[in-house]
Each structure stands twice: as structure tokens, then as C-alpha cells.
Image: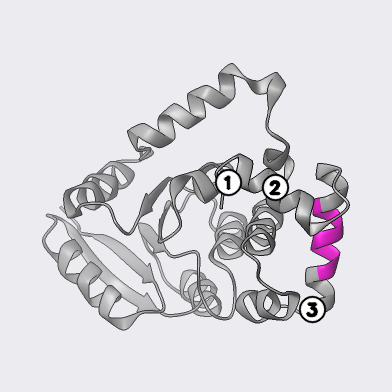
């Protein structure tokens, strides 16, 4: 059986090496390429064939959720596993809505990563029990959706950053955008959530245990 070709996208060389060793131990899987920023991901998928992408959210050059959206535009059938340091309750649902085949935190056991890769390699989705519960809970309360769920993945990411006390300049540097663009997103967030100040946003996010 032909080995499934995996593209790893993470900006930490030591972590990529660990992933490479784990994937090498899975039958019929191989790491075909690895990159350290979002722009390289798009270049690689345009010029090469992969069966699966393992993608971090925090990438230099271009945010992982934006890269995910671009992958889905260029290669809609290419499955993507988001492997991030951010907890599921922050970005799990957003990642699935954006087209990810699965979401896994970096603190999970190795066997869960193996399970996720194998499921996704078979054309299925990987959803952890806790994330599955969140999905079901959302369906049960679709008419009572929390305000923050109206935000796009990028808006939500910036809302989390603001709530964590980060200044516009710091957010702009981390997400590779201008301070003006951060301000535009902040205005959209406030409009959607009907807030008028950072303090209101922080109180809301803290009340939902999102920060």
C-alpha cells in the first residue's frame, strides 16, 4: 500500500522532529515535507501532492486559520489536522467550521495523535470526546448561541488577544498585520457583540472562561 504523504507546518524545529518520529512509526505514513511558516504551506500544496496536512495555528508570516481557509480554497479535499497549543474551547469549533478534519492540542498523548492521523487518513474526522460534547451542546442550543460564536476565526482570535490584555501593536506583530487592521477587526468585534469597550469584552470572555 502506498504511504500517505504528510506535510508538517510548525515553526518549532524540535517539535517538527518529534512529529516526524511519531509519524514514521505509523504504518503506511511518511512525512513528505515540513515547513515553518504559513506562506510556505501554500507554496508546497500548490506544487506537490499530499494526503494530509498537520497545521499549527501560531505560524509566522500567516496565521494557521487563514492558511486553513486558503488550503480549502485551493485543495478542498485535502484533509487538515490542526495541532495547536490553544485549548479546544478556544479554537476547536472555529477550526472545524473552517474545514479542518480534526483539532488536537499539543498536550494530548501520542496515541491520540496517532488515532487522529489514522482516522483522518481513512477519510474520517477526528473529534475528541470533549469537543464532540461541545458540538452536540451547540446543536442543542443553536437558537441560544453565545455571542462570541458569531465571530469569524480571525475576529475570535483577536478578541482573545484583546481579552488577554495584549496591545494593538503586539497583536499586529503576532498576526503579521497592521495596527490599523487590528483596529478594524476590533470595531467589527464590538459591533457583532454589541460592546463599546475592551472592559466589556474582557468581562464577557472571562465569564465564559475563554481567557
Camera-near label (2 vs 1) is 2
Residue displayed at 71% across by 56% down: 155
For mark 2, give the secondary structure.
helix
Comes first in the chain, label 2 or label 1: 1
Residue displayed at 58% across by 69% down: 63
Up the image or down, 109 lies above or below 161; here it is above
Q: In the picture, residue 145 is in which quadrant?
A: top right
Up the image or down, 73 lies above or below 61; here it is above
Numbered circles on residues, count: 3
Camera-near label (1 vs 3) is 3
**Residue on which the image places disc 2:** 203
User: Which percent across, then down, holds residue 10?
Assistant: 40, 73
Comes first in the chain, label 3 or label 2: 3
The range drawn in magenta is 183-189
**Residue on which the image places disc 3:** 179
Residue displayed at 77% across by 80% down: 178
Q: Is residue 74 left or right of residue 147?
A: left
User: Which numbered tag is attached to residue 94?
Assistant: 1
Residue displayed at 24% across by 68% down: 19
For mark 1, give the secondary structure.
helix
Q: Is residue 126 left or right of residue 207?
A: left
Camera-near label (3 vs 2) is 2
Q: Looking at this view, is 113 or 29 the one in front?
A: 113
Comes first in the chain, label 1 or label 3: 1
Magenta highlight on residue 185: yes
Magenta highlight on residue 18: no
Amino acid at each position: 500500500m502506498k504511504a500517505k504523504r504528510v506535510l508538517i507546518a510548525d515553526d518549532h524545529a524540535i517539535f517538527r522532529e518529534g512529529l516526524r518520529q511519531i509519524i514514521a512509526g505509523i504504518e503506511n505514513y511518511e512525512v513528505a515535507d515540513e515547513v515553518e511558516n504559513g506562506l510556505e504551506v501554500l507554496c508546497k500544496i500548490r506544487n506537490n501532492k499530499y494526503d494530509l496536512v498537520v497545521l499549527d495555528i501560531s505560524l509566522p508570516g500567516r496565521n494557521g486559520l487563514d492558511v486553513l481557509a486558503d488550503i480549502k480554497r485551493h485543495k478542498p479535499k485535502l484533509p487538515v489536522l490542526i495541532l495547536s497549543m490553544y485549548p479546544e474551547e478556544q479554537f476547536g469549533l472555529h477550526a472545524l467550521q473552517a474545514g479542518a478534519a480534526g483539532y488536537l492540542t499539543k498536550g494530548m498523548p501520542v496515541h491520540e495523535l496517532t488515532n487522529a492521523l489514522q482516522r483522518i487518513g481513512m477519510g474520517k474526522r477526528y473529534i475528541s470526546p470533549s469537543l464532540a460534547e461541545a458540538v452536540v451542546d451547540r446543536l442543542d442550543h443553536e437558537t441560544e448561541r453565545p455571542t462570541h460564536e458569531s465571530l469569524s476565526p480571525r475576529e475570535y482570535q483577536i478578541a482573545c488577544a484583546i481579552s488577554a490584555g495584549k496591545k494593538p501593536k503586539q497583536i499586529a506583530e503576532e498576526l503579521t498585520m497592521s495596527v490599523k487592521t487590528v483596529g478594524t477587526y476590533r470595531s467589527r468585534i464590538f459591533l457583532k457583540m454589541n460592546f463599546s469597550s475592551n472592559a466589556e469584552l474582557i468581562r464577557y470572555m472571562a465569564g465564559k472562561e475563554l481567557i
